[in-house]
Amino acid sequence: MEPLTQLNLDEFESVARDTLPAVTYDFIAGGAEDERSVAANRAAFQRRGLRNRALVDVATRDLRTGLLGLDLPHPILLAPTALHRLAHPDGELATARGASAAGALYTVSTATSTRLEDIAAASSGPRWFQLYHLGTREASEELIRLAVKTGHRAIVLTVDVPLLGRRERDLRNAWTLPPGVAMVHAHEPAWAPQSDGRSRAWASPIASANLTWDDLAWIRAASGGSPLLLKGVVRGDDAKRAVDLGVDGLWVSNHGGRQLDGAIATLDALTDVVASVRGKAAIVVDGGIRRGTDALKALALGADAVAIGRPQMYGLAAGGAGGVQRVVELLCAELDLAMALVGAASLDALTPDLVA
């Protein structure tokens, strides 16, 4: 394998675009409908400038953080993404190894193409498990218990998929899973369009149209006391209700623009969620983070950690475990430099006044 010489996360996307089949790249990179929310996530970071402090001692910087009982070397997480074997033959095993080598918390998706037991065996770092409600309480409880048994330290319940978004790249490509790749725990049906132009993916078992606030009680009970986060929260009132019900963390996300097109950019939603939670829950944000300065802005505006989705898949396509590791390490290095340049020697020094 050629050495990884990419200098930033966008260059990893270029490699993935050139390496993967076009329909697979579209499945990973694409969003819903006109992909306005995909673009909005990145534009929200670009709209905001930084106001650096002068004459601050930043000879050493400290990126360490604590998150729901975990001591982490940095605040960069891997967001849950589906079907890693589409990007590399080793799939989630390579992602787990790369995340472990880079010290990144890895959130494994219900839509994994590798069994949780095998991911656990390949990983030496911390993992969370992202849960899609599988339609029946019994099926979801069984999966939660397996996630806890295999060492996943928190349950991240996705709450923005009552139905799957209309992803027109996949419809146009008549996207279907290649032979040998499947959702091993979700038993996803065929993705090919039907004669009416719709896709059976809209009836997917990972779409949870009947999930309500009342379900949080049995989900928490099945997790045996593991921390519970809600992923897909973009409103302050929902965040407050979650905290009132005992949820431990909010993951501010619009699903990378793959669900509701026109959804608010996650950085724009962050301040409302932060203000409503008032420090009573951990806050993670994803969506459009490609530079260390993006991560810095989100952390300064109140996030406890930031997560990357597509970039880990691009790194995986470019170089397997080493590609995932390099993607995380590049982002951490950029964050470290940005902290020095903005005048913040630790994450605690990242405050809202730094963001214009």
Image: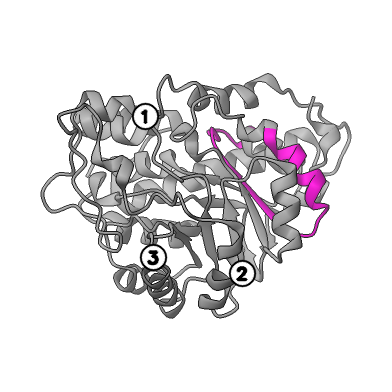
Looking at marks 2 and 1 on the same chain, the residue that comes earlier in the sequence is marked by: 1
Left or right, residue 200 beside residue 292: left
Q: Secondary structure at mark 3?
A: loop
Looking at marks 1 and 3 on the same chain, the residue that comes earlier in the sequence is marked by: 1
- Of tags 2 and 3, the one toward the viewer is 3
Compute the Cα span from label 2 to label 1.
Answer: 31 Å
The residue that label 2 is drawn on is 227
Left or right, residue 51 beside residue 150: right
Q: Secondary structure at mark 1?
A: loop
Mark 2 crowdedness (10 Å alpha carbons): few <14, some 14-19, many ≥20 = some
Residue under the image location 54 percent in, 52 percent down: 77
Question: Magenta residues?
Answer: 269-293
Magenta stretch contains residue 279:
yes
Residue under the image location 71 percent in, 43 percent down: 299
Mark 1 crowdedness (10 Å alpha carbons): few <14, some 14-19, many ≥20 = many
Mark 3 crowdedness (10 Å alpha carbons): few <14, some 14-19, many ≥20 = few
Q: Nearer the viewer, residue 38 or 127?
A: 38
Compute the Cα span from label 1 to label 3.
Answer: 29 Å
Q: Nearer the viewer, residue 58 or 279?
A: 279
Q: Quarter of the image for the N terminus: give it.
A: top left
Where is residue 84 drawn, in percent x and y? 30, 50
Q: Image height check: is 213 above or below 198?
A: below
Whether residue 61 is visible here, answered yes or no, is no
Q: Quadrant of residue 273?
A: top right
Q: Image height check: is 333 above or below 183?
A: above
The residue that label 1 is drawn on is 30
The residue that label 3 is drawn on is 136
Report the amino acid beneath label 3. Thr
Report the amino acid beneath label 1. Gly
Where is residue 87 drawn, in percent x and y? 26, 44
